[in-house]
């Protein structure tokens, strides 16, 4: 009689090869001694997947009429547990499908001798061979069995599956692990499996703490020399303690209000509001409790580092020296130094000269004189308004040109060239007067900020500064003398020092400067550019996972506009102050802004002057050729004098024109014009009479 026995082993492992060899030897020895019964072994490779091996094992059992499946199991090895699981599943699947035949499962724990283990397993299989199983016996067999399933150890108590869980605690280190003990819901941590399973007290007693259990046995990853730190999330019973600075420079940033007849306090301000908004959008609850801290900011950060506080919320600046001790979030506001200076009214005695620079005044005067000369040259020959003695001519043309700035001139002009020059000059005058008026108005209504960083430093002026770090920055980076830097502690110190003249300016962080300028916008201004720093951030313990969540939430507040809204509510100047806010002097009008306008005016006047001059020269030489002036034997000097006289009075030879004065009454000027008209009429009549006589 032949009994078929199936086995599921791992051919690729040393243990599997030993098992196969031991089983072959055991079967050979059994068949050699037995004359009535022979054994036939059927193997299937484990292949790394217990489920596939179990299915293949059940197929082998059906094809070869296997009555028993056995194996040598090492319960303490991973491969042994996989073999046991595969064999259990294979037998279960076969018996579930078969109605005529049931498989018997036999396995034996691997001891020190694989051959003895294999022989014992086969003997056990032979003892149960050819026995019939009933449903009751099968049920009793299952209820009394205990094996390792996919979810752990499986056994039955009182006819029910036991759910008691016992976990083994291990310490994974590099490619190995170290067994530390056991844990059960009823007895906690224990070094002994008996204590964890049955509650038997060992020398350490029931309820060992985990730290006592693993003391000296845990090896941290990376072979650290210190104990690794863990994190316990805050709860309602154990909230995170938040340190809040009680000596903030401005109440707009952090404000702590005591409740009368109560130990409770109200925490408010820009920093507190931002912290609460961040907590609101977190994916989890973060119970917290504020605690006032009245030390320095460095001590506040140090108390977070030494775990006195779980975090710090307030106007804490992110600095390099603090970075190594604690964990900062993303900055929720910009930080840096701004200079705040008092508003000083400008000296107004000569302020009317301030709208134009010196170059502008000189250029305006030069264009005015040039235009005056061109107008005189074009008009004095034919226009009685610009005639008379040279003093009268100079006064008239100067008055005409200057009064045209205000469109107040009344003299009539006769030359078209003059009209072109005057139109361009009026255009220039209009722009100059409007620009001058606007600049002077702004100077009279807006007070100017006098000092600058360099001027204060050169004059050895005293400045106020707050925190120690910023005082050091002002001394080392901005190069102010230490004796010229006065320490300030709060807003009242700045106000008092400004009023009594102790300081000429103050260096404040950007949020402080915004708040200060908002409250006292009529007296003080923010001036100059900022000197940037890290910004305000929330402080957590080093390595805290909460800091990363807060940084992400702060970015979300920036992107959805919540942070901007809070800044406008707590930090941004009001509408009244915003209209007067300025950070630099108003620019005066310089020559660079108007040189093109001046060039246009000069070019127009020059073109008209040259055209008219060419016309006069042409008339002068025409009269010279017609013989109305002296002959060609005249010397150069006399010619030059007569040319100048011609250009001045349009006279040739001994011709003279009766001088007219601009001061003559209109009646006299009309009489002169009438006399000239009659003379011209008489000459015309005399000429007609001669023509009639010749006929």
Image (cartoon, rainbow, N blue to C red):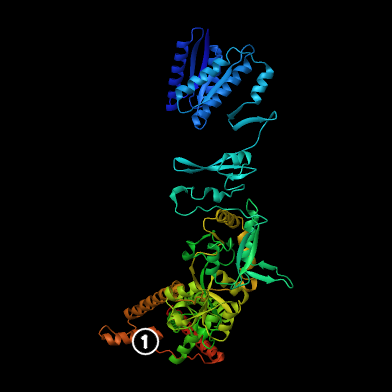
Residue ID at (57%, 80%): 493
Helix, strand, or loop for circle 1? helix
Tell me residue 168's x, y (percent).
Answer: 56, 40
Residue ID at (49%, 91%): 661
Q: Is residue 345 left or right of residue 163?
A: left
**On screen, 484 above or below 536?**
below
Tell me residue 360's x, y (percent).
Answer: 45, 79
For the residue pair 232 and 177, the one nearer the viewer reads as 177
Q: Residues within 10 Å of mark 1 (few under 14, many from 20)?
A: some
Q: Quadrant of the C terminus?
A: bottom left
For the residue pair 476 and 562, the one nearer the viewer reads as 476
Residue ID at (58%, 85%): 499
Q: For the view shown, which residue lies furthest in the front direction?
A: 203
Residue ID at (45%, 40%): 176
**Residue 8 visible in rendering:** yes
For the residue pair 49 and 196, the one nearer the viewer reads as 196
For the residue pair 418 and 11, the one nearer the viewer reads as 11
Tell me residue 40's x, y (percent).
Answer: 49, 12
Q: Is residue 217 left or right of residue 577?
A: left
Residue 202, located in which quarter of the rendered image? top right
**On screen, 39 above or below 166?**
above
**Residue 689 visible in rendering:** no
Q: Which residue is mark 1?
A: 645
How many tags in the picture?
1
Tell me residue 431's x, y (percent).
Answer: 52, 75
């Amino acid at each position: 009689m032949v009994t078929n026995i199936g086995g599921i082993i791992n051919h690729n492992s040393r243990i599997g090869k030993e098992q196969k060899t031991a089983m072959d030897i055991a079967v050979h020895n059994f068949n050699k001694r037995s004359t009535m019964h022979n054994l036939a072994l059927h193997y299937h490779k484990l292949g790394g997947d217990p489920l596939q091996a179990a299915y293949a094992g059940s197929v082998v059992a059906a094809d070869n009429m296997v009555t028993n499946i056995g194996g040598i199991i090492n319960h303490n090895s991973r491969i042994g547990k996989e073999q046991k699981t595969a064999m259990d599943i294979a037998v279960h699947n076969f018996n579930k499908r078969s109605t005529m035949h049931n498989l018997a499962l036999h396995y034996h724990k691997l001891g020190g001798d694989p051959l003895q283990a294999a022989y014992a397993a086969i003997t056990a299989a032979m003892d149960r061979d050819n026995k019939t199983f009933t449903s009751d016996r099968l049920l009793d067999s299952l209820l009394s069995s205990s094996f390792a399933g996919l979810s752990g150890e499986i056994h039955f108590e009182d006819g029910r599956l036991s759910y008691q869980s016992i976990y083994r605690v291990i310490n994974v280190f590099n490619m190995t692990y170290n067994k530390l003990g056991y844990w059960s819901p009823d007895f906690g941590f224990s070094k002994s499996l008996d204590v964890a399973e049955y509650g038997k007290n060992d020398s350490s007693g029931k309820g060992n703490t985990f730290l006592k259990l693993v003391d000296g046995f845990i090896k941290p990853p990376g072979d650290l020399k210190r104990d690794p730190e863990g994190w316990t999330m805050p709860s309602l019973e154990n909230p995170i303690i938040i340190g809040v600075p009680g000596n903030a420079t401005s109440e707009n940033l952090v404000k702590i209000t005591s409740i009368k007849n109560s130990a409770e306090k109200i925490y408010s301000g820009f920093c507190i509001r931002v912290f609460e908004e961040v907590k609101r959008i977190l994916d989890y609850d973060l119970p917290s409790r504020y605690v006032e801290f009245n030390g320095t900011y460095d001590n506040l950060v140090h108390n977070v580092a030494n775990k006195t506080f779980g975090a710090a919320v307030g106007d804490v600046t992110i600095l390099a020296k603090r970075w190594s001790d604690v964990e900062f979030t993303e900055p929720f506001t910009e930080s840096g130094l701004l200079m705040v200076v008092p508003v000083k009214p400008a000296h107004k005695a000569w302020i009317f000269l301030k709208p134009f620079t010196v170059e502008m005044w000189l250029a305006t005067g030069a264009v005015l004189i040039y235009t005056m000369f061109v107008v005189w040259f074009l008009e004095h020959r034919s226009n009685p308004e610009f005639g008379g003695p040279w003093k009268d001519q100079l006064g008239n043309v100067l008055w005409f040109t200057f009064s045209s700035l205000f469109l107040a001139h009344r003299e009539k002009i006769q030359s078209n060239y003059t009209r072109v020059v005057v139109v361009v000059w009026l255009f220039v005058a209009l722009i100059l007067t409007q620009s001058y008026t606007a600049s002077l108005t702004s100077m009279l209504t807006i007070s100017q900020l006098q000092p600058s960083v360099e001027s204060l430093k050169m004059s050895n002026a005293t400045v106020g500064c707050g925190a120690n770090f910023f005082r050091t920055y002002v001394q080392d980076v901005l190069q102010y003398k230490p004796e010229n830097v006065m320490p300030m502690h709060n807003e009242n110190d700045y106000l008092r020092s400004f009023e009594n003249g102790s300081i000429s300016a103050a260096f404040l962080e950007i949020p402080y400067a915004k708040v200060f300028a908002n409250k006292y916008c009529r007296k003080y201004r923010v001036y100059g550019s900022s000197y940037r720093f890290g910004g305000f951030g929330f402080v957590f313990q080093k390595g805290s996972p909460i800091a990363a969540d807060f940084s992400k939430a702060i970015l979300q507040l920036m992107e959805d506009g919540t942070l901007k809204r809070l800044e406008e509510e707590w930090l941004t100047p009001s509408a009244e102050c915003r209209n007067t806010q300025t950070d630099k002097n108003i620019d005066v009008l310089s020559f660079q802004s108007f040189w093109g306008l001046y060039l246009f005016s000069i070019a127009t006047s020059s073109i008209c002057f040259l055209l008219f001059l060419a016309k006069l020269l042409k008339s002068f030489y025409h009269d010279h050729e017609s013989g109305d002036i002296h002959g060609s034997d005249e010397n150069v000097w006399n010619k030059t004098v007569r040319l100048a006289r011609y250009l001045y009075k349009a006279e040739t030879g001994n011709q003279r024109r009766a001088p007219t004065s601009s001061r003559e009454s209109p009646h006299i000027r009309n009489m002169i014009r009438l006399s000239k008209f009659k003379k011209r009429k008489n000459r015309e009549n005399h000429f007609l009479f001669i023509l009639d006589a010749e006929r």
